[in-house]
Amino acid sequence: MSATTIKSGLQDTASILSNRLVVDMLEPIQMLDTNLNQFSTILDHPDLRGDVLSSYLKEWLEDRLIPRTMSLAGGLTGAADTAVTTGAGEANYVKKGDLIRVVTTGECLRATADGSNATLAVARGVGGVAAVSAATSTVVGTLVIIGHSTPQGSSLPTMLITQQTHNYNYGQIQRKSWGFDRTARQSHWYSQNVLDSERDKKLTEFKTDRENTVFFGARSYTSNGDASGHPLGTAGGLIEFISTNVTDISVASGSLSTTALENFITQALQFGSQDKVFFVAPKVGQAISHLLSSNWVRAQPDERVYGAKVDAVISGAFGASIPVIVKQQWGAYGTGTTGQYGSLGFLVDLSSVRMATMQSPVRLSNRQANDLDGIEEEYLCEETLVVAQESAHALLRDVTSGGS
């Protein structure tokens, strides 16, 4: 038996056995990361809930009206030139009798035959503007189909119908698990019970997995994904679908100008609905607020879009007001001019995105083996993102600052 320790004199907290002190522990436990998963919140809203995912593969069809704009790939050399060269395939938009304006000169042309690939046969100088030469222009919109003219008593014009296109995405199973043995569960802990606190943490992590997938997911499928003989599907996010409206600011060394931003918004609003939301990294939000100080309106504290908190509203083309949602997490993903996620902005048309679900997000308890002295749980979902009409959305890349 060891000797008894004797203390003399006035005692303080350093001299008394430390085990006797009650730990002054602040509750609850302070978390560094917050739950800011706005896009998945929007997609889970009842008014935007998507189709059921009834297979490992979700497919959909897309269509559009016959385009009306063409480029002038071969210039009109004079009044007698009746052959027009368009961009590849653009002449197929034209049928005999269509009226076409050359916007650079104002001259109106009338198609004298159905267009074929990149070749048009036309009559010149229709209306008040005489036939004049026109320079070659690769800008789509140099030639605009304004309507059709049919002679009296004529038969039906050529029937032109757009071919529908097919698109798809794969279902992805996402799981987030945790567990504690019986002793840990029955022990006394600061703040919540360890099982309850871990449920809260894992829910936030699970939501972030879903949120990152709808933006950055990779579309893939293999019949033997993990060498177990079982199929593995991964869902593509917006970054894999958007290809038409991509504005890369790296050419300006990452400095976003007012002109570049306005052109980006105008281009993005040209197609689809006006029900759009701008998801931006903090650096992009900072640049936009600097550039559009007169059009950047801080949202009211209770202003929301389908349940998601709105940070600001900016005025866009066509009279649209665009809610801006700042993605706080992306600030931790790095900024730069080589694709870093902390320098991205997605302008999303909410009428053209849906979540297709086979298994809605759910917490499943008692996932452990029967003889385990403990409990194991998980969050699980199986779903995919439907991104219809990719040209209705837009991607802003490589923003590091706001210019002028």
Image: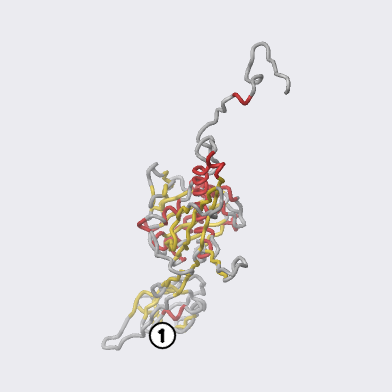
Question: Residue sitting at 50 percent across and 67 percent down?
Answer: 170
Judge whether residue 364 can be spotted in this image: yes
Question: Residue sitting at 62 percent across and 20 percent down?
Answer: 13
Of 226 and 51, the residue lying toward us: 226
Specify the farthest residue to the front. 1
Residue 364 percent coordinates (x, y): 47, 54
Specify the farthest residue to the left. 153
Q: How many marks?
A: 1
Instruction: Residue 44: name its quadrant.
Output: bottom left
Specify the farthest residue to the top. 9
Up the image or down, 154 lies above or below 197; here it is below
- Please say which color scheme the image uses: secondary structure
Task: Specify whether 404 is left or right of 105.
Answer: right
Residue 98 percent coordinates (x, y): 37, 80
Judge whether residue 404 can be spotted in this image: no
Residue 372 percent coordinates (x, y): 56, 51
Of 68 and 31, the residue lying toward us: 31
Q: Secondary structure at mark 1?
A: loop
Question: Residue sitting at 61 percent across and 55 percent down?
Answer: 337
Which residue type does callout 1 highlight? Asp
Q: Quadrant of the N terminus?
A: top right
Give the labeled residue for mark 1: 114
Up the image or down, 168 lies above or below 330; here it is below
Q: Residues within 10 Å of mark 1 (few under 14, many from 20)?
A: some
Of 163 and 52, the residue lying toward us: 52
Residue 224 percent coordinates (x, y): 59, 70
